[in-house]
Image (cartoon, rainbow, N blue to C red):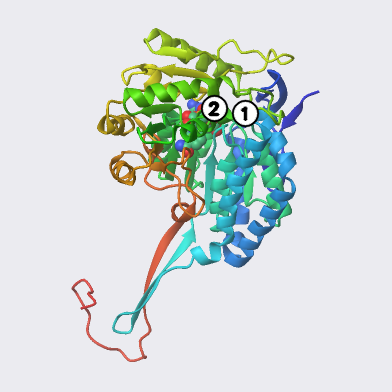
Amino acid sequence: MLRTIDHFIGGSTFSSGERQGEVFDPNQGQVQAHVRLGSASDLQKAVDAAKAAQPAWAATNPQKRARVMFKFKELVEANMDELAHLLSSEHGKVIADAKGDVQRGLEVIEFACGIPQSLKGEYTVGAGPGIDVYSMRQPLGIGAGITPFNFPAMIPMWMFGMAIACGNAFIVKPSERDPSVPNRLAELMTEAGLPDGVLNVVHGDKEMVDAILDHPDIAAVSFVGSSDIAQYIYSRGTANGKRVQAFGGAKNHGIVMPDADLDQVVNDLAGAAFGSAGERCMALPVVVPVGDDTADALREKLIPAIEGLRVGVSTDPDAHYGPVVSQAHKERIEHYIQMGIDEGAELVVDGRGFKLQGHEEGFFIGPTLFDHVKPEMKSYQDEIFGPVLQMVRARDFEDALRLPSQHEYGNGVAIFTRNGHAAREFTARVNVGMVGINVPIPVPVSYHSFGGWKRSGFGDIGQYGMEGLRFWTKNKVVTQRWPDGGAHGESAFIIPTMG
Ligand code: NAD
């Protein structure tokens, strides 16, 4: 009998409905559990719970809300091994990387622990005669998060950590491919003292997502996933009057200048292109060496490094990366490898046909390297989201700068150089949201904010940090005067000025 993953509503599990999805063990290629695929009536139950809990939670002073976050952090740390194993068993990323997934989410919880400080408003005393002006940030009410499969711990925590600390109630709709960890996180939030109904998890697919986008009591939606869905979420959510931020796919470039330390670049690229089987929105799947000499030298060093990567089951402590998430995704990646060949790129290392003994049905793909990839190729333009590194040779700095700037995605980019001037010039001019200088995966720390540009991000405000705080609150500005009792002055028919 396989386990069924239920919704988590009002502080406990909730099961209803016949529709279910399959959750795989990507190491074995077999179904290991079923997940409820909920409907609008399941969502209504979560909204009812959230609505009942939110006013009291918003009225709880920020210091007490922060204490729940502190306790939650403690509990997640105490349960780190269990969470990482659960995550890895459904996603396929190796245990150490699964711990990183949890840890990067926890760092946003750490920021949320400081909510009394960061939520303080602004005050101007004496903005006019006897007049003070102050602002306060108030919660929106009920927020929702729709999250992708590739960071099943971090991304829900980015969203609910900030939203809940700000005084909102929250509903998470995780990816149906690895739905268990968000449930476990919600249980730990309850154990940390969060009142029932403040955090709910509903499972499902498009039907549930559409119910969220159309629900009049959900004030804001945060989405992370692929770009076409992000655009759909943004359009439908905003058409329904909601505040929406929607982050999409990526195709991040690593520019390698002729003066870069190539051994360091090879180390960085191996981790950033192949870690988590390339299933990261901040992976580095395109390398752009500047000049043929740089390209040839880099290629020579990259080939043995790539051939030396160890692909294994996600619990193998020596594996660099594990299987991809599903059979369909494996086939999609292999399709793109074939497309690259057909388009005329040079396949240098071929990861297709990789089989792991004893795990022949697992969703494994070996590391793959292409050289002489050209910007007009579809395999370059599309996000592959697998262990495939594409080398696009640039003539010079300007040529290298143009590639990420003109690509339809604009999530992250990195430049490897010893030249501060080149790095500074690149950073100022590149048309991409997050830049690394000799840092391959420039995911901003939790007290800055995350957000890609172009088709990597719809909406105008980032995840977590102060941008997250602004997303999950609305600003109220108060202009106050306390007259001394007598009536003064005359009615004014012109707009008040402080002059
Ligand atoms: P996805 O777009 O398939 O799914 C994301 C969410 O949308 C899931 O919860 C899913 O249930 C829902 N969804 C799927 N199809 C839908 C539809 N037709 N209508 C409504 N909802 C739908 O993405 P994924 O495969 O889970 O995740 C990988 C993608 O996410 C990649 O493109 C990756 O680059 C991107 N990603 C982006 C960031 C970022 O911050 N920019 C971070 C992580 C992942």
Residues 100 and 168: in front is 100
| Image position of 199 with respect to 368: above or below | below
The residue to which callout 1 is attached is: 320
Residue 374 in which image quadrant = top left
Residues 493 and 242: in front is 242
| Image position of 116 with respect to 318: above or below | below
Residue 202 in which image quadrant = top right
- Farthest residue, direction left: 494
| Image position of 159 with respect to 7: above or below | below
Find out if the beta carbon at label 1 lies less than 8 Å from the nearest ligand 1 atom: no
- Disc 2 and disc 1: Cα gap in Å? 8 Å
| Image position of 72 with respect to 14: above or below | below
Give yes or no for contact between labels 2 and 1 (Cβ–Cβ under 8 Å): yes
- The answer to whether residue 210 is seen in the rendering is no
The residue to which callout 2 is attached is: 274
At 74% from the left edge and 46% from the top edge, which residue is drawn?
79
Residues 95 and 21: in front is 95
Residue 443 at what x, y percent from top left?
48, 43
Q: Amino acid at mark 2?
A: Phe
Residue 311 at what x, y percent from top left?
63, 22
Q: Amino acid at mark 1?
A: His
